[in-house]
Amino acid sequence: MKLLLILLLMPITFLNWEMMTISFFILTFLAIMNLYKFYTFELMNFMFSSDLMSDTLMLLSFWICPLMLISNIIINKKMNNNKEFALMVWASGLFLMLSFKSMNLMLFYISFETVIIPTLLLIIGWGSQPERLQAGIYLLFYTLGASLPLLIAFMYMNSLCNTMIFPLMWFSNKIMFSTMWALIFISAFLVKLPMFLVHLWLPKAHVEAPIAGSMILAAVLLKLGGYGIMRMIPLMMPQMMKLANTFISLGLVGALMTSIICLLQNDMKALVAYSSVCHMGMMLAGMMTQSSWGVNGSLAMMISHGLCSSALFCLVNILYERSTSRSMLISRGMLCLYPSLMLWWFLLSVNNMAAPPSMNLFSEIALMIGLISWSKFNMLPIMFISFISAMYSLMLFSIPNHGKKWMMSAFMLPSQREFLILMLHWLPLNMLIIKMDLWMSWT
């Protein structure tokens, strides 16, 4: 509750992005302290919960928000809209915190849907291409189309249980409904995840969004879908087990298809966006096994993918600001110009393909164990997904860095601000592997 009060007071007290950045880092420190005081489940009141899954995802949100502010310093100085941009970041952080902490279904639904508004305004207001309007419409209508059935499902759940509090619903014996209702319940979360076949809004939104929009989309918004599914599965376990085979198959086939699509991409931002869909497909498949390894691996992948994907979007934006193109062919030969920047490119590319000692390695191994224990036939698609993921990660590193440049011109060197952003993504991604027993105690 104290974190929420501090977050609500931030726009009143601090009117510039510098003070808001410091405030978000203070919130991150307080959230870490809260995490280490954690007990298995602590019901603080009937509105806000404190369990390890919600606290860790809230900590990820607080960590990414100041990095969003730092990443747009130059753009803000040119456009003189510091306060408006800081307000959008603050609103995103507030609604994300409410989504992850709320125990009331209606409060969860309102905050879950409202977090789209600042993201939409970031894409439309700070995007650079005219197609950003079309990307915003894609994002809005995909979300609305799946969320209205979710609202009806919440009303139906309230009529069955006479309550909208998560823990009280777990002890209710009246939750007996068809598999169709279970599908309606998780449809909005599958779109937000996004699952293969309902993923078309994500690459478009990523490509047209500014760097801060891509960071919040990749790091936190995609995790709302996984968080919602994890919250809903215990309420309807018999129905979800009937759908498990379907979603595991869709997740693995989708991950395989999107990893092949990644190999065909020339646009670096689109490649990173499709790799997000690939990772989320694996996460969905592991989550649906409902085994200890599958669930813990999917929750660890939320954190590792959030940090790694956000850092890759930062790197793509750094190259785009210098070469004015997201094409890998036009940006090639960067190794001779920016060897220090290419070191970060290498470190984050190998993290994206789950090399040690990153959290990505642990999460993918846990997901593989959960999926193979569900069915040994899952070994075949997992093998191809891992191999193709390594291929497109190496392609993303090698093509822009090696080769001869199209034009020999001098560009500005990377700034300390840009190295700071990359360092703050990479450090937790590789240091949290030391404390992996924390992730294994989520369930």
Image (cartoon, rainbow, N blue to C red):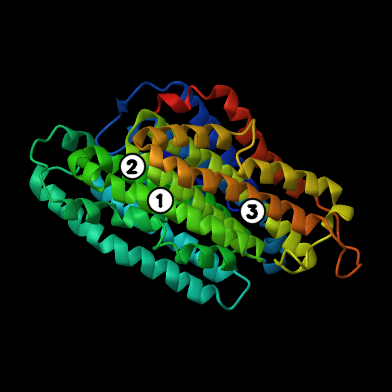
Answer few, some or many: residues within 10 Å of disc 3's Cα (few below 14, many 20 plus, some between 14 and 19): many
Choose the circle earlier in sequence order: 3 or 1. Answer: 1
Mark 1: few/some/many CA within 10 Å (<14, 14-19, 20+): many
Residue corresponding to mark 2: 288
Q: Quadrant of residue 72?
A: bottom right
Quickly name the residue at label 1.
251
Relative placement, left or right, of 74 versus 438 is right
Callout 1: SS = helix
Alpha-carbon distance for marks 3 and 1? 19 Å
Q: Nearer the viewer, residue 144 or 268?
A: 268
Whether label 3 touches label 2, CB < 8 Å? no
Q: Residue 350, relative to residue 33: is it above or below?
A: below
Q: How many marks?
A: 3
Residue corresponding to mark 3:
392
Residue drawn at point x = 58 percent, y = 43 percent: 307
Secondary structure category for the residue under label 3: helix
Position of 409 with respect to 67 (left or right) is right
Q: Position of residue 442 (x, y in %)?
A: 40, 28
Q: CA distance from mark 1 to mark 2?
A: 9 Å
Q: Earlier in the sequence, mark 1 or mark 2?
A: 1
Residue at image point 72% right, 60% down: 74
Element on which disc 2 rests: helix
Going 44% across and 25% down the picture, which residue do you hit?
440
Contact between marks 1 and 2 (CB within 8 A): the answer is yes
